[in-house]
């Protein structure tokens, strides 16, 4: 999509740049279906070697119950105030608890800051099925 | 929930503070159901006199098709690096296009920055049915 009215325009972020941004950020938001409607929660996360999103959640937490073999959304976004650009990357994927010793050992190697409470012994992986990104450019005149 | 292991703890944000934070922020994220799964998109928004979330979207945009009379999620979050607090407020509510002249006139009075493309002639209101917020406190020793 190109310039519209010379004010605000949208640019698609290419897949390689979506992946780079996913690897640069550390806080994102997961979208899960709760009683038939979406809910959104911030999480600390990391991207593993396979390109999956990995995060920890608390044993017994509501979120944990929602994210085994579910289709979930994961989003990161940011603003570049200087360049007047807002951007976001959206991942849709299948979530799965990590269960095997090997899976858990690999997950523990990832650098994961805590946006969660407690032992955080449970790791969840989101295996992306769809990744998309967009930038919104706002011209000075529009501000 | 109180202190766990003296490291990281969660605090519920009271309703009045949830509302204050919703009024302070200008960018949030909407969660909508697309083909049976959640997706998340950043939006600029404002809170109207009734406490509803109001945002603009483009005529014909995919998002617009999803948000008439749907149950949607809306989330804002932030980090206080100094105090080592991460917080988020989640709204679940019913979305509705604004259609009447009066509704649209009122919406145009709101201060809405553009995180959208084009004419943005369409306004959507999210009428909250559930508002909740939480803070995650991380102690220095955990960082």
Image (cartoon, coloured by chain):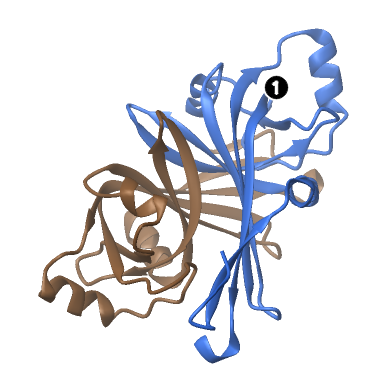
Chain colours: A brown, B blue
Q: Residue at x 46, y 62 (%)?
A: A43
Q: Secondary structure at mark 1?
A: loop
Q: Residues within 10 Å of mark 1 (few under 14, many from 20)?
A: few
Q: Residue at x 35, y 57 (%)?
A: A60
Count of all numbered marks drawn on residues in the image = 1
- Residue furthest out toward the bottom: B141
Q: Residue at x 74, y 30 (%)?
A: B52
Q: Which residue is mark 1?
A: B121
Q: Disc 1: which chain? A: B
Specify whether residue A129 is in view. no
* Spot occupied by residue A32 in the image (x, y as percentages of width and height): 39, 43
Nearest the eye: B57 or B100: B100
Specify whether residue A125 is in view. yes
Nearest the eye: A5 or A36: A36
Location of residue B140 by image quarter: bottom right
From the viewer's perspective, is A18 left or right of B42? left
Nearest the eye: A118 or A4: A118
* Spot occupied by residue A14 in the image (x, y as percentages of width and height): 37, 53
* Spot occupied by residue B58 in the image (x, y as percentages of width and height): 60, 27
- Residue furthest out toward the top: B100
* Spot occupied by residue A44 in the image (x, y as percentages of width and height): 45, 67
Relative to B73, is A130 above or below? below
Q: Residue at x 68, y 57 (%)?
A: A84
From the viewer's perspective, is B49 left or right of A42? right
- Residue furthest out toward the front: B2
Relative to A75, is B48 above or below? above
């Amino acid at each position: 999509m190109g310039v519209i009215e010379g004010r605000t325009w949208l640019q698609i972020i290419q897949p390689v740049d979506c992946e780079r941004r996913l690897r640069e950020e550390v806080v994102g938001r997961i979208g899960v279906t709760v009683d038939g409607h979406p809910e959104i929660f911030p999480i600390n996360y990391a991207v593993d070697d396979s390109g999956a999103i990995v995060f920890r959640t608390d044993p017994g937490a509501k979120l944990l119950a929602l994210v085994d073999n579910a289709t979930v959304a994961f989003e990161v976004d940011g603003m570049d105030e200087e360049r007047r650009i807002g951007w976001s990357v959206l991942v849709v994927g299948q979530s799965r608890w990590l269960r095997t010793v090997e899976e858990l050992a690999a997950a523990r190697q990832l650098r994961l800051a805590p946006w969660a409470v407690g032992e955080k012994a449970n790791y969840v992986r989101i295996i992306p099925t769809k990744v998309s990104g967009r930038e919104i450019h706002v011209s000075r005149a529009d501000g």
